[in-house]
Image (cartoon, helix red, strand yellow):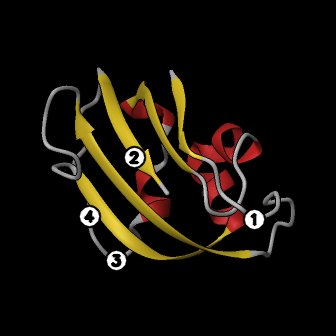
Amino acid sequence: WFRLNVLGEGGALDTADQPVRVRLRAARMGERPGSLFSTERDYVASELRDAGLGDVLARCQVGDSVSLIAPAQAITWNRLASATPITMPDTGMIAIELS
């Protein structure tokens, strides 16, 4: 499930080494956004693609805000939070807010 909340004014994220500032909040369905994982930091676009967010990035432009529901296992969380260990559910769906 994918929903575009706010349309950005920037261009597409089409280069692997393009830096992008990302705010990401993840939670189990029905829980407070960010209760599983929350960050705001710079990523290289290829890091986000390698973490399993390539399909999302392909549909986004710089400045967009999106909500998505995905299987917890679809995201490689250690790529997103290399400095902080994350405990994600093995199964089930999670809600992600990405801007």
Q: Residue type at mark 3?
A: Ala
Mark with earlier residue (4, 1): 1
Q: Is the Cβ of the residue at disc 2 closer than 8 Å to that at disc 1?
A: no
Measure how far apart labels 2 and 3 are at the Cα level.
21 Å
Mark with earlier residue (3, 1): 1
Per the image, the residue denoted by label 3 is 83
Q: Which mark is residue 10?
A: 1
Q: Which mark is residue 85?
A: 4
Q: Residue type at mark 1?
A: Gly
Mark 2 vs mark 3, foreground winner is 2
Could you tell me residue 62's position as x and y percent? Answer: 69, 62
Could you tell me residue 56's position as x and y percent? Answer: 64, 41
Mark with earlier residue (4, 2): 4
Single out the residue that lies furthest toward the right.
15
Q: Is residue 80 left or right of residue 37?
A: right
Mark with earlier residue (2, 1): 1
Q: Residue at x 65, y 57 (%)?
A: 8
Q: Residue at x 68, y 52 (%)?
A: 49
Mark 3 vs mark 1, foreground winner is 1
Measure how far apart labels 3 and 4 are at the Cα level.
7 Å
> Does residue 88 sit above or below 12 in this rendering?
above
Q: Residue at x 28, y 71 (%)?
A: 84
Q: Decide which of 41, 62 is in the foreground and name it.
A: 62
Location of residue 47 by image quarter: bottom right
Could you tell me residue 27's position as x and y percent? Answer: 23, 41
User: Dot 2 surroundings within 10 Å: few (below 14), some, or many (20 or more)?
Assistant: some
Q: Is residue 58 left or right of residue 68?
A: right
Per the image, the residue denoted by label 2 is 97
Q: Is the Cβ of the residue at disc 3 closer than 8 Å to that at disc 4?
A: no
